[in-house]
Image (cartoon, rainbow, N blue to C red):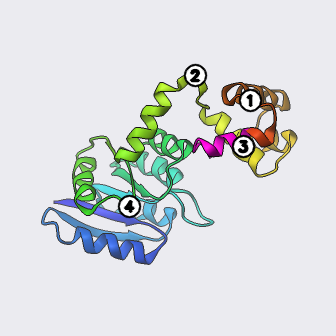
Amino acid sequence: MIRLLLADDHAIVRAGLRALLDVADDITVVGEAATAEAAVAFCATTPVDLVLMDLSFGSGRSGVEATARLRELPSPPNVLVVTNYDTDADILGAVEAGACGYILKDTPPGELLSAVRSAAAGDSVLSPAVASKLMTRVRRADTTLSRREIEVLRLVSDGRSNREIAKQLFLSETTVKSHLVHIYGKLGVRSRTSAVARARERGML
């Protein structure tokens, strides 16, 4: 029996997932969490095989942060990200934090159940759309932004100055400028505005 925790800040999403999962004989939903902190706290005291984790929890910790903390527990559950977000930064952040799978919320019910069973066993699971995006990233490795470059560009898109970016990411302004040079070169642009626009076109932001 797969012991499963639903971690999503929307009650209606948790209810929908529970209704779908309850029909499976080999899956039991042992709990629900509306915040990332609650998900970590639950798993620290209750045996869980798999957490279905959203990435965004409003103003609290993110699903990526929760995933990293869950994987540090003495008996860590596997984590399957179930979300609406499919940018390169989201996918890579979740995988690097320790998630064994990443699927989108529009995944058909049959595929979701299959993904749950595979992820509970520790197998890697990616929805077709996410797998395709990662394959494209691999093929375009020379023009793909690193995770740090995406962090810098995301702050640029928020209107932050180089000094503000340096302070938030604990970098020197020179390093920030160096990242921007690499970003411009990879995206084939000459300005901050163009870099943000091009990254959004490619689904990087």
* Rendered position, 174 above or below 118: above
Classed neighbour count for the residue bearing mark 3: other residues with Cα under 10 Å, few (<14), some (14–19), many (≥20) = many
Tag 3's secondary structure?
Answer: helix
Which image quarter is the N terminus in?
bottom left
Residue indicated by mark 3: 196
Residue at image location 67% in from the left, 34% down from the top: 149
- Which is nearer the eye, 52 or 109? 109
Q: Which mark is residue 184?
A: 1
Mark toward the start of the polypeptide (3 vs 4): 4
Is 118 part of what is drawn in magenta? no
- Residue flagged by tag 1: what amino acid is it? Tyr
- Residue flagged by tag 3: what amino acid is it? Val
The Cα atoms of the two marked residues, 2 and 4, are separated by: 31 Å
Q: Are marks 4 and 1 in contact (CB under 8 Å)?
A: no
Image spot of residue 32 (x, y percent)? 37, 71
Q: Main secondary structure of the magenta part?
A: helix
Q: Are marks 2 and 4 in contact (CB under 8 Å)?
A: no
Residue indicated by mark 4: 106
Mark toward the start of the polypeptide (1 vs 3): 1
- Residue flagged by tag 4: what amino acid is it? Asp
The Cα atoms of the two marked residues, 3 and 4, are separated by: 27 Å
